[in-house]
Image (tube, helix red, strand yellow):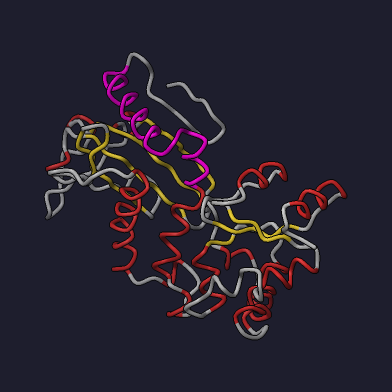
């Protein structure tokens, strides 16, 4: 195998029997998302958004992955599949989860680490996208594989599903193998700061406290909704009466990955596509840049 890209891109060797087919599948997948750079940029927030939506802090008052019920953790696999299909803008397969470049592709995920993907009979000898999520380390992997029988264990469970043998995992083509996605925001602050933010007042003041006290931290829309705890949570963040006005007067900009990409790149910031980050300029030139973009006063 050869390795390239800092994110852990590990394609199969050119002599591998699956190299040609998986290279074509990777090319079609990356083309669907706009190229490797955009794939990695959006991947930072992909798992974060899915997990945060299931935690659902605003309604459940839960903050962490370990607070999920077992059935909710199982449902996350379906959630990842649905969001991946929407992200790729590809149709459902006839027999499997997706169609990518005209080929049927199944989606399998594990949140337990290792190689815990369960392969059903209909997915044997088919293409699969493998997703692995480690919420404790905030690391993920995305792999492609053709699930040949010789890569799988001989035994099966009650549902006739099987998994990869120890040697079988060497046949996975990794788009990313040790990729840092956006960590759960609540794991990065202590209980005292969490209480300070959540007791700062109504929605607008809570959001202002959040972004003022958590400079440079990636914050998802789901977390913004959780802190605002109001149906019109985005109104509490916008200008014209929202938290951005309070922060702009203090010289703090709130940037959004979907709209402020160019500005973020100039500042050396890396966040997910649908994530926010607050930033206080570190130099006069940065202040002029943010002031010129209308982000601070």
Residue 30 position (above or below residue 251)? above
Residue 249 position (above or below residue 206)? above
Residue 68 located within the stretch drawn in magenta: no
The secondary structure that most of the magenta stretch takes on is: helix
Q: Residue 241: where, in percent of width, then height?
A: 66, 76
Residue 207 position (above or below residue 156)? below
Q: Is residue 215 left or right of residue 58?
A: right
Residue 222 position (above or below residue 47)? below
Q: Is residue 109 left or right of residue 62?
A: left
Q: Residue 152: where, in percent of width, then height?
A: 22, 36
Residue 27 located within the stretch drawn in magenta: yes
Instruction: Out of 167 and 78, give the one closest to the viewer.
Output: 78
Residue found at the far top of this picture: 15
Identified at 61% across, 70% down, the residue is: 237
**Occupied quadrant, residue 291:** bottom right
**Occupied quadrant, residue 196:** bottom right
Quadrant that contains the C terminus: bottom right
Quadrant that contains the N terminus: top left
**Occupied quadrant, residue 88:** top left
Identified at 46% across, 37% down, the residue is: 176
Q: Is residue 291 left or right of residue 115?
A: right
So how many labels did they put on this image? 0
Instruction: Out of 295 and 22, give the one closest to the viewer.
Output: 295
Identified at 56% across, 77% down, the residue is: 228
Q: Residue 39: where, in percent of width, then height?
A: 46, 40
Instruction: Out of 57 and 149, give the one closest to the viewer.
Output: 57
Q: Residue 5: where, in percent of width, then height?
A: 54, 29
The boundaries of the magenta stretch are: 16-43
């Amino acid at each position: 195998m050869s390795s390239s890209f800092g994110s852990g891109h590990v394609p199969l060797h050119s002599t591998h029997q699956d190299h040609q087919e998986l290279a074509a599948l990777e090319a079609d997948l990356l083309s669907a998302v706009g190229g490797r750079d955009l794939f990695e940029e959006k991947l930072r927030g992909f798992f974060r958004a899915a997990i945060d939506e299931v935690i659902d802090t605003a309604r459940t008052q839960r903050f962490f992955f370990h607070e999920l019920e077992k059935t909710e953790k199982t449902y996350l696999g379906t959630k990842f599949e649905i969001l991946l299909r929407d992200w790729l803008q590809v149709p459902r397969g006839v027999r499997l989860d997706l169609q990518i470049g005209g080929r049927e592709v199944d989606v399998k995920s594990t949140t337990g680490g290792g190689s815990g993907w369960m392969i059903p009979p209909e997915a044997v000898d088919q293409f699969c996208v493998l997703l692995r999520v480690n919420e404790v380390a905030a690391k993920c992997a995305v792999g492609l594989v053709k699930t040949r029988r010789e890569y799988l264990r001989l035994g099966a469970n009650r549902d006739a599903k099987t998994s990869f043998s120890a040697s079988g995992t060497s046949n996975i083509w990794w788009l990313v193998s040790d990729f840092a996605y956006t960590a759960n925001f609540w794991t990065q602050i202590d209980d005292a700061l969490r209480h300070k933010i959540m007791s700062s007042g109504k929605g607008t003041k809570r959001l202002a406290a959040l972004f003022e006290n958590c400079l440079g931290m990636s914050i998802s829309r789901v977390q913004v909704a959780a802190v605002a705890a109001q149906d019109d949570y985005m109104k509490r963040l916008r200008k014209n009466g929202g938290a951005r006005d309070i922060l702009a007067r203090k010289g703090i900009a709130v940037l959004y990955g979907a709209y402020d990409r160019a500005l973020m790149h100039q500042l050396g910031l890396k966040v997910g596509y649908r994530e926010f980050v607050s930033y206080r300029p570190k130099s006069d030139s940065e202040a002029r840049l943010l002031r010129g973009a209308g982000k601070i006063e």
